[in-house]
Image: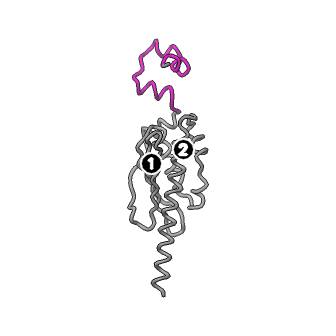
Amino acid sequence: MAGTLANKCLSPLTFITRRLSAPEFITQCCYHQKVVDHYENPRNVGILDKESKNVGTGLVGAPACGDVMKLQIEVDDQGKIVDARFKTFGCGSAIASSSLATEWVKGKSVEEALLIKNTDIAKELSLPPVKLHCSMLAEDAIKAALADYRLKQQDDQQEAVRASN
């Protein structure tokens, strides 16, 4: 099987001129350069203060593969996403999807961020069909973070109404 995969991915000349290590073989063969770039140089890794009323946190997972994604957004008073952070436990495609998602949500309004679809993420990263669940997790994480943010805003509004009565 590895030989068949190698024939499809790399020219025979590659094997004559040098040997590839296992990680090198996989990145040369199976992942698009954009995935490798986001995996090797992930953007916006970290955490935001989940207790802040302007921070929404989404935590999603895929039991079938074990990927877990935590994505957080920080929204300013005008409803614009000013920061985003993620932590992901999973494969290179899951990490790349999270990294790209944080880049895409920054600078968008809450409503605009809801329009980001897994198909857009998958297309940008050239994910193969077997890795589409990673882009689905990223979309779900964005939606979960936005839902958490909106829930916090509703709670604040209800507290303000109670305080004024």
**Which is the main secondary structure of the residues drawn in magenta?**
helix
Q: Which structural element holds mark 1?
A: strand
The residue lying at 56 percent from left, 61 percent from top is 110
Q: Which mark is residue 24?
A: none
Quadrant of res 109: bottom right
Q: Is residue 56 above or below residue 23?
A: below
Q: Which residue lies furthest to the bottom in this view?
A: 165
Q: Is residue 77 above or below residue 101?
A: below
Residue 134: % across, % down: 51, 42
Compare marks 1 and 2 and give the one earlier in the sequence. Answer: 1
Q: Is residue 85 above or below residue 95?
A: below
Q: Which residue lies furthest to the front in this view?
A: 64
- Residue 139 drawn in magenta: no
Amino acid at circle 2: Ser
Q: In this view, does 68 lie to the left or right of 78?
A: left
Residue 1: % across, % down: 50, 19
Residue 25: % across, % down: 45, 24
Q: How crowded is mark 1: few (under 14 residues within 10 Å), some or many (20 or more)?
A: many
Q: Give 136 or 26, whichever is nearer the viewer.
A: 136
Which residue is tagged 1? Answer: 69
Q: Which structural element holds mark 2?
A: helix
Span colored in magenta: 2-31
Q: Residues within 10 Å of mark 2 (few under 14, many from 20)?
A: many
Q: Is residue 30 left or right of residue 119?
A: left
Amino acid at circle 1: Met
Which residue is tagged 2? Answer: 135
Residue 106: % across, % down: 51, 55
Q: Give 111 or 148, whichever is nearer the viewer.
A: 148
Q: Cα distance, mark 1 to mark 2?
A: 11 Å
Asked if the residue under mark 2 is in contact with the one under mark 1, i.e. CB atoms within 8 Å, the reply is no
